[in-house]
Amino acid sequence: MTQVERHSYDVVVVGAGGAGLRAAIEARSQGMRTAVICKSLFGKAHTVMAEGGIAASMGNVNENDNWQVHFRDTMRGGKFLNQWRMAELHAKEAPDRVWELETWGALFDRTKDGKISQRNFGGHEYPRLAHVGDRTGLELIRTLQQKIVSLQQEDKKEFGDYEARIKVFQECTVTRVLKEDGRVAGIFGYVRESGRFFVIEAPSVVLATGGIGKSFKVTSNSWEYTGDGHALALLAGAPLINMEFVQFHPTGMVWPPSVKGILVTESVRGDGGVLRNSDGKRFMFDYIPDVFKEKYAQDEAEADGWYTAPDTHRRPPELLPRDEVARAINAEVKAGRGSPHGGVFLDVSTRLPAEEIKRRLPSMHHQFKELADVDITAEPMEVGPTCHYVMGGVDVDPDTAAATGVLGLFAAGEVAGGMHGSNRLGGNSLSDLLVFGRRAGLHAATYAADLGGSRPRIAEEQIDNAAAEALRPFSAEDTGTVGGRAENPYALHQELQQTMNDLVGIIRRAGEMEEALRRLADLRVRSRAAGVEGHRQFNPGWHLAIDLRNMLLVSECVARAALERTESRGGHTRDDYPEMDRQWRKSNLVCELADYRGGPAGQDPAMGQIKLTRSDMPPIRADLLALFEKDELLKYLTDEELSA
Amino acid sequence: MSYTGRFKVWRGDAGGGELQDFEVEVNEGEVVLDIIHRLQATQAHDLAVRWNCKAGKCGSCSAEINGRPRLMCMTRMSVFDESETVTVTPMRTFPVVRDLVTDVSFNYTKAREIPSFVPPPRLGPGEYRMQQEDVERSQEFRKCIECFLCQNVCHVVRDHEENKTAFAGPRFLMRMAELDMHPLDAAEETGLDRKTTAQDEHGLGYCNITKCCTEVCPEHIKITDNALIPLKERAADRKYDPLVWLGSVIRRRGAID
């Protein structure tokens, strides 16, 4: 029997970004004893990297905005593959979630009449993003963090203990969700600092772990984004959907090499920045797809007029959804019209006065000056696509955020699938975190409360297995398959990133994805021999060796689903199937573990681990369909769906 | 463009440690954190370091580089001479956990002791109205990424462990200033005076405005000039305001009678 530290809570939230913290606040407010577990320090989550803003149809800048318009934009952005009920709830509840932040101390930028200011963004018909300069994510995290502190202060007053009802386990990693008879029983994890194992018994677990970007070489994501929640769900028997849809943000830094991939906010374009190729041409006018022809300006004069007179001008094509802009940049570079370091030019210096740029885009100004010696008030930036976000994730019930197939498991934020369809609009992530973070926390609390005394128990065998799995990297040399030598986990990770970047990246081909699956199988075998030196105390090599399991699982999901979907849509572009196919619209590709009962030692690493099936989405509700013109629907829905 | 750089990196744990010498490849445009990562991947797989965003936004990779408190992700290698040996050590004010990772729990303890924002009781969600110029002062302080470099460099606690109990440090005194300047904070209505609390309970008086905190702030927040000095002035106004003084004397007399 493995000796571990044991705790008991009502609700465990895995992840302390926007979704996790909002879920925890809700669960605690429902009276549940709540634990939050995060890989980094409290307040450092990836949400701090969000720059542009939170999309919510408050109508503060353009009073024509409302939830219906936001819903329409979201569905268009996702090319109608969105789980429509999630898109509906999101559009309806986002304003309340933003206003609530103000009552917790958030300080957004203001309009002249003192309301929350809203800015333009790609795919949003009206100025919709509540923001604080270009550091909105930091404001969101800090506000939620400080709200949790204020709840802890209340508990200190009432119970004499800050952590009586909500405790943050920082710098801890969860490696397994534990179950009994198909129900969640708790989690197993380790403390990064000491390497000690711990178990939390809890009937409700909310996954809020973010995304998978660290499986790609060029990415805006931090080390934390290793697909932990995606993998935890798979391993617990819960399916993932839409894993083929990966968002490549059109504008990441490209130079110098060490900062390649770091995000350049879409606000640069929202506030007037334009994209040019090496000929100095504003090329986006050449890349407006048919489905968006009526909505976007056809020439520079019309596009420039939109900033001051949006009611009489169509939008500039730089503000097309991200998938469109990323593909366009990719095509320009491929055609030999790129910038010196393999990107294109993003210029705001000729569009706004220097002082205005510094006021609106302070962190971009700072970032380019410090890291690239570029003064964005005087010269253009060089930018190119970077892996940014995964639309796919845990298949959840839209209203309760409950994961399919595992009672007591919930998922919210980037780790949940469906909400954004095949492509997420900028600004819809922060609102997603708040809307579904709250819902996940609420329903996780209700589920735990309703169980009463009949909570599942954790079998000792599961703890032993989880501990053995986590410790394997220390004995890898004994079990290693490559001549008894341990593999370097950093080298394996780099090979994985290169494979996904080159073979399952922004433009995909069948042959390359088949090759990717072969390489993933090879990496999976070698990862079993990933070994580490040293001891368990704060050992990054060991942590990476454990994370590799998750990255390999989600990478296989992405590659398998991408190979299967023979069309191009949103964040999935096939060179061999370049058209969007209406027959594919209502289909979700579902990834499940081929054998989730298999213990860590019982799996054959050379075999694929993922089983892929297809499932149809429920038809879109009639009153929501009625929000669109029939002509537009015809571009997305089949004739049968429309006549039904 | 590449060269072999010489590094000294502190390795060890709470029990002790030492500077270790490394020779490592340095490429154009790289920052110190890139070099630490290269050491991890090629020479010292278990070298402990905190980092997240690698873009100066999360405040995780704080350390001391050639003795200066800095973010490793925002320190370009080009600021050093190629022949110079670059020394990287953990933040000195906090106990070492391992290598470059320190125990920063002091800061989380202090964060909990600062009274939270008090929402105005008569305003519901969506009813808040504030002017941009009124929120800007507090917004400057909310740029803080909690890298804790200011806490690390502040001489009140840097070499004076004994002051840690009574002193919140620049980051959290600034938090008090931020709330005090929030246009809609209703603390006063609940009887909480943030200025005197800062003075009496969180050690504002220890600060003698040497501005070390401002100098190391990677967000270029004017901690001393815009947060600490105004907070001190307002705390002093409160204390030496003749009317307030008279009021407190009268109340005290009343108590004696």
Image (tube, rainbow, N blue to C red):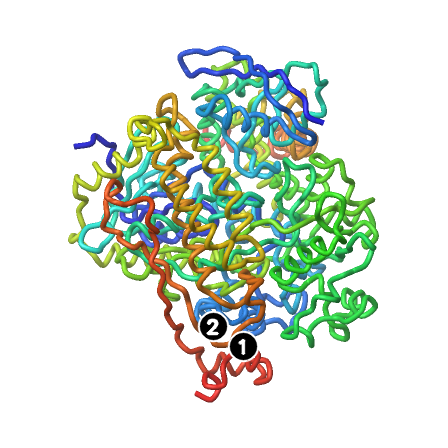
Which quadrant of the view contains residue A408? Answer: bottom left
Q: Are marks 1 and 2 on the same chain?
A: yes
Task: State whether residue B230 appears in this view.
Answer: yes
Please identify the quadrant where the N terminus of chain A is shown.
Answer: top left
Q: Position of residue A63 (x, y in %)?
A: 65, 71
Query: Is there a contact, CB below 8 Å, between mark 1 and mark 2?
Result: no
Q: Is residue B173 above or below residue A607?
A: above
Q: Is residue A560 above or below residue A186?
A: below
Which residue is depicted at the point 42% across and 45% down? A551
Mark 1 and mark 2: Cα distance apart in space: 10 Å
Q: Nearer the viewer, residue A187 or A477?
A: A477
Which residue is depicted at the point 57% across and 85% down? A630
Please identify the quadrant where the C terminus of chain A is shown.
Answer: bottom left
- SS under mark 2: helix
Q: Nearer the viewer, residue B223 or A282?
A: A282
Q: Amino acid at mark 2?
A: Trp
Q: Is residue A457 left or right of residue A118?
A: left
Task: State whether residue B201 appears in this view.
Answer: no
Q: Which mark is residue A584?
A: 2
Q: Residues within 10 Å of mark 2 (few under 14, many from 20)?
A: some
Q: Position of residue A489 (x, y in %)?
A: 43, 33
Please give the residue where the numbered disc 1 appears in the rendered image: A636
Q: Position of residue A322 (x, y in %)?
A: 62, 60
Which quadrant of the view contains residue A480? Answer: top left
Q: Nearer the viewer, residue B26 or A222?
A: B26
